[in-house]
């Protein structure tokens, strides 16, 4: 018996109901995006009373399937003005699923000028005043305070000072099993939560019945086959396990697609200093933890504890994109400084991609010198202080560009372009341009096929095949993001057909369904259409599906340009 | 023999040619908007190399017709992302017209990191290094420096420090006959000029042949009839002459349409303290100049020299909208403080509407207290310093709202809504929503008919008749903005049919044409269609033609709401 819970922050009314019929068969991103498309006025102000924030675990979240711990968060994005799904690890989604909560919806804006905690238990949902001490407090410490109060194992979704300030790149942070930080990072959903005056949502799954499985034996055997795919594929069992996602620095540098100096070229001479191999060796030498999981049941374990010279924890979830943005794009050749910047982003509660790409825009505008890591870290620390400079940066790369009159700003739909040069990895360039999310590599990770040669081989430097590649991956991703699976399972299931079939078999076994691969594709298409429909009604057109004009410049070492015509780009969503 | 001059700031090439045939029959806004629609890539970055800035005098500019001194400036707006025409008084347009220059176009971005002066004479156009001393200097002083160097009567178009910083609300300032400041204020065209590294354009009309008139006697007699209309109508001969546009404070307050406290209500108790009557009495008591013209040939003389207690000049072109925004909307009941703020806006080179509306947004966000004029003035002075706070403010109301997480932000298409509450003056509300310019009262000044009962009488509080009113006025305005006439001639010619006919007769006599009133309407329609076409290609849709959602609240004293449906709003451009 699933529950659909609506929390109205204006009236403080909590309504728990059966799942509406139209949402009964969907979960994760499929649910959040259809809900936002159905219920949020597309032209509303994202920080006004008509926006709604929804949390929904995926189909398989809360089961013991490997890597099934993801939670989708959705709303109209204050950063892009379009629809947003941002998903995360941590313990929150699994607890929701085990408690039979299909969705948590937060509506309205309180009249009161104070912050609240929404507390979710098996018995009820209550709205309490937030402890005064955690207002303005960093996420690391605030999670500790909340878990001291609500239980050491309580799931926590929290906004940092950035979300309180409603900064456009504010994220929602989630406690992971070690009470460290996982984030629904992109698109400013933390500002939406802040506008609703929700400092944190705390979930206690004591007494939760767990996720019901219709055909337990079938599920068990499918789960085993699925896990086998993950433990067989070299990327999911060795590459990212050993080196984290940061294994990509040297790979992308070799491929000429590692954007350097605010996307001026695709290769540099210091990449190895900041790459995954160096990072892991550093952690090993210092007594860090090179590999661990962001949620229970993760067997890829791409996260880590990056530590200082004394072996003290600095950060985890230390991803390639953040390391790229500061290390290559902003030319800060210093992993420790980058780690402190990553920690600061997590602690203050901002998307580390948009913030670190913004650092390159500051350098482009001459505000701080190229490569000056200390200056970059100081800028990031301004966010917490709420100074004008901190607020500018906390609103992300597009706002920094606007305020400093910089025209070379790598954003699409107002969201920062991550770590793969679209001229050297053309499939992902098409994803940046066309995904309803704003520039987002995870929406259709063509890097896999362009560079890693997973799921086929499409030349990253030529147009041929990339339109289909981006389209198919965006469709598949919209489906995977609905399953509650970590997106990285795609590395394995794109190459191992039985892994993909096992994923479908698990869903069928859990729900007593008989979905086929075509159904999964149809699901993905329907999600994208709902998202694009919302954006269309919000005022987006094909003219928004364009990369910044500076990508017409050649990108060394391959000297390719972004040469897709408008008509070609518009073909991506022709399905 | 008209000249069409293109200045390429990248190559420093100047190309002077005959007027392209397609632009031969148009001038002013019709020329700038068609040119931008034809030649500027709609999706380009407004501060990048593909944007172009064009200056074009109107049909009658440079003749001795009354009030014919206006110059249109056009480009893609960095503030709205759409097309922009912003027009101005001053001496520049008349000099261009007398020299036979139909258009000055500025293209490209220099590689050099320094500012230039473009010097225009009858002999040639040259590009010189800007004198170092004027970089960062305020407009009042910089105009003096340039006129000392290039001639006391030289026409000057200049950007202030705000334009150098490419701030989104930076304007282009023009010297008036007394070397004070007139502005092409709205939409950030100063940032476009700054991106092209043009500190100023200086024009010396020595040896200019003057504007050729085909039928001199016909022109003379039509001009006389036209002037008679202006000197007969009470608004153009008495109202704004005696009290400036600030006569509107008491009128709008009486009408319940004077937005107060960031558009919370339409009437307040202190309006008379800041109104035109008080302002004129103050100037008279202090030895100011209550009435003078912004360009040679102005007979309405709505400008003034507002002076301090010692009789020293503070500002001119001290308009109702600026006084409203600080005096009513931000509750700063102090005309002197408002005058200093207006001067600071002119001197640093920003749109005084967007900046002063932004002050209300700061107050909404709790950054400074309501009514604190000193704090407001200090904020405005930050712009010149280029501090982060100054840059935020210099980017206008929309950016202040974004950076401070404020959702009650009165903007449409990113441009600030001026001085007339759309719930109490519904015709102008439709203009705000639908004009391709972003919120702009001058694009279709329905206040005239709604409140002043000029050109008919349409109830400001009801829907009936307002769609047609806004549509017809937007069409007429696009035509008037093409004539080189001050828009305020509309007050007279909407009521006095022979005044309107005389305007057409003047154009016919000047060019040897036989245009009819229908031709004028067709011209206006064609201009709007060109503008809307550009915006459409730039990514705008009907969803952008909406007022902020807070206008659904009731507005005292009439307690009306913004109640047009989307379909009704979309009817405005159904022609």
Image: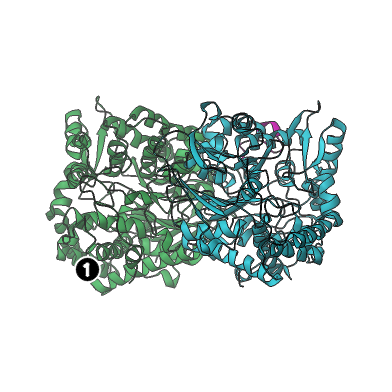
Chain colours: A cyan, B green
A370 drawn magenta: yes
Horizontal and vertical percent position of residue B147: 40, 40
Q: Chain of mark 1?
A: B
Please tell me which residue lies in front, A394 or B281.
A394
Please tell me which residue lies in front, B148 or A452.
A452
Residue that mark 1 sits on: B505
Q: Please tell me whether residue B142 is drawn above or below residue B194 in the rendered image.
A: above
Q: Please tell me whether residue A564 is drawn above or below residue B169 in the rendered image.
A: below
Q: Report which quarter residue B461 is drawn in.
A: bottom left
Q: Report which quarter residue B433 is drawn in.
A: bottom left
Q: Is residue A500 left or right of residue A367?
A: right
Q: Is residue B69 left or right of residue A276?
A: left
User: Magenta stretch mostly in which secondary structure?
Assistant: loop
Q: Is residue A356 left or right of residue B90?
A: right
**In what quadrant of the picture does the N terminus of chain A appear?**
bottom right
Q: Residues within 10 Å of mark 1 (few under 14, many from 20)?
A: many
The boundaries of the magenta stretch are A366-375
Badge 1 element: helix
Horizontal and vertical percent position of residue B242: 16, 43
Look at 78% across and 29% down and name the residue there.
A308
Horizontal and vertical percent position of residue B374: 35, 27
Examine the rendering and report whether any part of residue B493 can be seen: yes
């Amino acid at each position: 018996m699933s529950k659909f819970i609506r929390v109205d922050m204006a009236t403080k009314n909590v309504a728990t109901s059966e799942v509406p019929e139209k949402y009964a068969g969907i979960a994760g991103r499929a649910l959040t995006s259809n809900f936002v498309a159905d219920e949020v006025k597309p032209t509303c102000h994202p920080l006004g009373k008509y926006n709604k924030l929804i949390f929904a675990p995926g189909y398989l979240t809360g089961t013991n399937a490997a890597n099934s711990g993801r939670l989708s968060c959705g709303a109209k994005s204050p950063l892009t003005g379009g629809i947003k799904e941002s998903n995360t690890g941590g313990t929150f989604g699994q607890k929701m699923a085990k408690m039979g909560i299909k969705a948590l919806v937060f509506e309205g804006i309180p009249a009161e000028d104070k912050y609240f905690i929404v507390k979710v238990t098996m018995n009820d949902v209550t709205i309490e005043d937030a402890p005064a001490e955690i207002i303005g407090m960093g996420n690391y410490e605030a999670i500790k305070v909340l878990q001291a109060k609500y239980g050491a194992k309580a799931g926590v979704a929290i906004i940092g000072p950035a979300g309180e300030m409603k900064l456009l790149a504010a994220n929602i942070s989630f406690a992971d099993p070690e009470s460290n930080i996982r984030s629904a990072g992109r698109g400013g959903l933390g500002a939406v939560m802040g506008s609703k005056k929700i400092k944190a949502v705390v979930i206690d799954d004591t007494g939760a019945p767990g996720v019901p499985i219709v055909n337990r034996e079938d599920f068990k055997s499918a789960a085993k086959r699925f896990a086998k795919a993950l433990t067989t594929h070299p990327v999911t069992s060795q590459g990212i396990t050993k080196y984290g996602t940061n294994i990509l620095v040297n790979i992308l540098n070799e491929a000429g697609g590692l954007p350097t100096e605010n996307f001026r070229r695709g290769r540099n001479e210091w990449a190895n200093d900041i790459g995954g191999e160096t990072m892991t060796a550093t952690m090993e030498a210092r007594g860090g933890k090179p590999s661990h999981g962001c949620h229970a049941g993760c067997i890829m374990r791409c996260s880590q504890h990056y530590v200082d010279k004394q072996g003290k924890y600095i950060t985890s979830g230390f991803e390639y994109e953040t390391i790229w943005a500061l290390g290559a794009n902003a030319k800060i050749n210093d992993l420790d400084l980058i780690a402190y910047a990553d920690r600061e982003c997590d602690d203050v509660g901002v998307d580390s991609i948009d913030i670190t790409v913004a650092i390159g825009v500051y350098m482009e505008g001459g505000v701080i010198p190229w490569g000056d890591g200390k200056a970059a870290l100081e800028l990031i620390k301004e966010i917490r202080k709420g100074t004008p400079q901190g607020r500018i940066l906390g609103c992300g790369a597009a706002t920094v560009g606007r305020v400093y009159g910089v025209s070379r700003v790598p954003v699409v739909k107002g969201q920062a372009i991550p770590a793969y040069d679209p001229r050297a990895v053309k499939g992902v360039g098409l994803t940046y341009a066309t995904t309803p999310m704003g520039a987002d590599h995870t929406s259709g990770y063509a890097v896999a096929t362009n560079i890693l040669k997973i799921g086929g081989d499409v030349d990253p430097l030529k147009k041929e095949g990339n339109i289909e590649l981006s389209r198919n991956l965006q469709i598949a991703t919209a489906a995977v993001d609905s399953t509650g699976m970590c997106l990285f399972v795609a590395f394995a299931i794109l190459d191992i057909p039985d892994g993909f079939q096992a994923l479908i078999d698990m869903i069928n076994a859990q729900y007593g369904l008989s979905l086929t691969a075509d159904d999964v594709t149809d699901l993905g298409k329907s999600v994208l259409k709902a998202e694009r429909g919302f954006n269309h009604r919000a005022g987006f057109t094909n003219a928004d599906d364009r990369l910044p004009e500076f990508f017409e410049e050649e990108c060394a070492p391959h000297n390719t340009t972004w040469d897709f015509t408008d008509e070609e780009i518009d073909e991506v969503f022709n399905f």
